[in-house]
Amino acid sequence: MMLLSQKLCYKYALITFLFFGLQGIVSTGGALETAFPDIPIPIPFTAGRSFHLNISIMWPLFGITGIIYFFFGREAGREIYSLKLIEANFWLFLVTIITILGSLVLGFNEGIEYLEALRPLKVGIAVSISILFYNLIRTYIVSKVPKSRATLVSILAGSCTLIVFFIPNILRYSHPVAEEFLKFWVVHLWEEMSLELIGTGVLAAVLVTLPGMQRSTIENVLYLDIIVMVVTGVLATGHHYYWAGGPSYWIWVGGAFSTIQIVPIFLLLYSIMKTVKLQYFSQLGQREKIVMAMIASSMFYHIFGAGLLGFLMAIPAVNKYIHGTYITSAHSHLAVFGVFGFLVLALSYYIFFSEIVLDKKSYWFSWIGILLLNGGLLTMSTALLVAGGLQSHFWYVLGLTVGETNQGILPWMLLRLAGGLTYTAGSSLLTYVIIKKAWSNFSLCFPSLKELEQQRCIELKDLHNGFQQLVVTASKLEQALSKTKLLLDKYLKIKP
């Protein structure tokens, strides 16, 4: 029987896919304008870029909020502390994100990359993630499961650090270096520590349900992952500090610890391959196959896009020449969407189709959408990598101007546009599947608390009646056994 808090998470999954589909459409417009700067577009490039950067952070964050509520209650073995706070969290977060995106399109911009939103709207984000953490910690306190359960600890640590790293970015600073330092607490540490902790904790909560996977095994690996993610996440940020104006030793510290950041995903992958039989995956249901395909995509990009590419980029001798090129853009696409985008989509898909039936047509549309997303992301990232390499060569070797360089990399910008169009086709197809199902299951996606409470009362009443019938049946069975015993004793006594 599902928890009431889990039923409140369907709308989180739905809105996550809507934002995801919107991001694909907007980013295609940006790629088009990059390739053809003279094409008239109603939204200025600066406003469109800010919109793209912010929605790429906000929709995974919004999605992970619903995912946390869904799996944290299950891992805690009880309902989330306050269902009303889950509802309030949803509407506050949704309205804040919509207002941020709308204000950026209209040109209201504070000028801090990735954190362009107006200060009162940043407060709305801070309040939203604070409500999430408060609801989780109150649930954790009253939970009867062991407090050392690694999945709960990992999710709590990640949720807490979301607040810790974000709140300093609401304040104003007189020195631009201080502002840049703190910006990377969100741009880098949110992704490579906070969301890593949350994502790994939630993924572990899913993996413990696989046949052959022992909780003790996954939790031992998870605790080691937590330690590595915290240490490497904090210190690997150092290469950003150097380029923001910090001492030169930061680039070496950042480069050294960036090499260790791929360790956690390898440990988790090793524990899966060692304990779960491969034939299990062929026996999965339709929903589970789609979810596992997206999780596998996330792991692939985690290793190669975020891990290995990030490691190469962090090497000081390399970073000196590629910093600020399209190689950085390729890495951000592979790391943000490739890793966390796919993971959030996978778990949101899992939640959405918990009670909604996934028909065969939607199943195949989902597969096509995943293939298009991967094909588009790989094409787009490859084009950006080559374009970034050419930028470095044209600037540092040939000494060309920015204008001449842009002409030289134009073919790769066109390939990037083709990859973006493919990606958008995939995101639109997946979003269409979700919208179509939500349209015919609107009451399930947006249940009222009153209706859920009534439904739960009916379920409990049915459970009570069933138990009562079981007690009556057991009593009758006990009487029948007693009579049988008496007759058997009597028979044995009179038998010669």
Image (spheres, grey):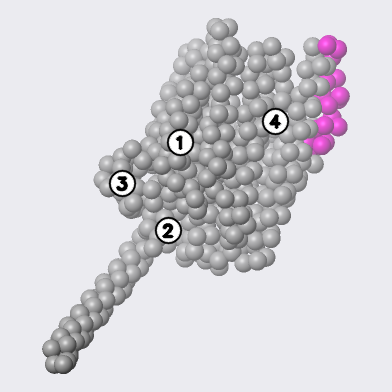
Q: Spatial distance from mark 3 to mark 1, Cα to Cα?
A: 17 Å
Q: Earlier in the sequence, mark 1 or mark 2?
A: 2
Q: Amino acid at mark 4?
A: Ala
Residue 227: percent from left, percent from top: 44, 27
Task: Work out whether 474 lies above or below 321.
Answer: below
Is 410 magenta? The answer is yes
Q: Earlier in the sequence, mark 4 or mark 2?
A: 2
Residue 323: percent from left, percent from top: 68, 18
The quarter of the image holding the N terminus is bottom left
Do the residues bearing badges 4 and 1 touch, measured as CB atoms within 8 Å? no
**Of marks 4 and 3, the one in the foreground:** 3
Q: Report the residue that reaches farthest toward the front.
A: 496
**Residue beneath the point at 42% across and 33% down:** 223
**Residue beneath the point at 20% across and 80% down:** 478
Q: Earlier in the sequence, mark 2 or mark 3?
A: 2
Q: Earlier in the sequence, mark 4 or mark 3?
A: 3
Do the residues bearing badges 4 and 3 touch, measured as CB atoms within 8 Å? no
Q: Amino acid at mark 1?
A: Leu
Q: Amino acid at mark 3?
A: Val
Q: Which residue is mark 1?
A: 222
Q: Which residue is mark 2?
A: 7
Q: Which residue is mark 3?
A: 145
Q: Which residue is mark 4?
A: 330
Q: Spatial distance from mark 2 to mark 3, Cα to Cα?
A: 22 Å
Question: From which residue to which does the magenta span run?
Answer: 397-417
**Of marks 2 and 3, the one in the foreground:** 3
Q: Secondary structure at mark 1?
A: helix
Task: Work out whether 129 lies above or below 188.
Answer: below
Q: Earlier in the sequence, mark 3 or mark 1?
A: 3
Do the residues bearing badges 1 and 2 touch, measured as CB atoms within 8 Å? no
